[in-house]
Image (cartoon, grey):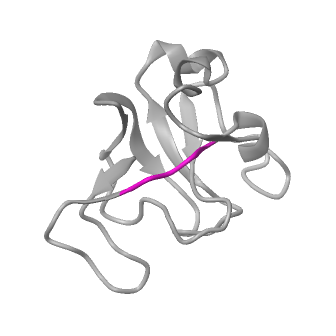
Amino acid sequence: ESEGSGEILDEGMFSVLLSVKLPIVSTSKCNSSNSFSGNITTNMICAGSSTGGKDACKGDSGGPLVCDGRVYGLVSWGNVCGDSRFPGVYTAVSRDLKSGEKGIVNCFNVIS
């Protein structure tokens, strides 16, 4: 789940905290040639819907990627909000994540 009060597509900024449930996208899928082409490092996590439309967006930077009360990442950057080809990119804050998402498979769905 990602939280923030940033932009929702073209609807502008919100003054209330919103959240969205997002699956983790595997590093290999996120690094594919039709996505981020190798720019995702071991200190990053990709999360986003395979059908698009759900994502962190402008104004959400620094917001948490949370599961079961534990912060796994912080909203960092992305390409186009809600585009299924380009999931949101989060800075990993847990050492468990730096070895292939092992620490989060029980908490999030993983798209590989």
Residue drawn where x is 34% and y is 30% of the image: 68
Residue at left offset 64%, top offset 15%: 99
Residue 79 percent coordinates (x, y): 58, 63
Q: Which residue does the image show at 54% across and 57% down from the upper left?
A: 78
Image coords of residue 56 (percent x, y): 42, 59
Q: How many marks?
A: 0
Q: Which residues are magenta?
A: 20-24
Measuring from the top left, give residue 59's x and y in whole percent: 30, 63
Residue, far left: 15
Left or right of 48 in this view: 28: right
Is 16 situated left or right of 51 in this image?
Answer: left
Q: Residue drawn 50% across and 51% down?
A: 22
Membership of 74 in magenta stretch? no
Residue 86, x across and y down, in percent: 65, 59
Q: Quadrant of residue 41?
A: top right
Q: Main secondary structure of the magenta part?
A: loop
Relative vertical location of residue 10 with respect to residue 90 in this rendering, above or below: below
Q: In which quadrant is the C terminus drawn?
A: top right
Q: Is residue 49 above or below residue 75?
A: below
Quarter occupied by residue 15? bottom left
Front-most of residues 61 and 51: 51
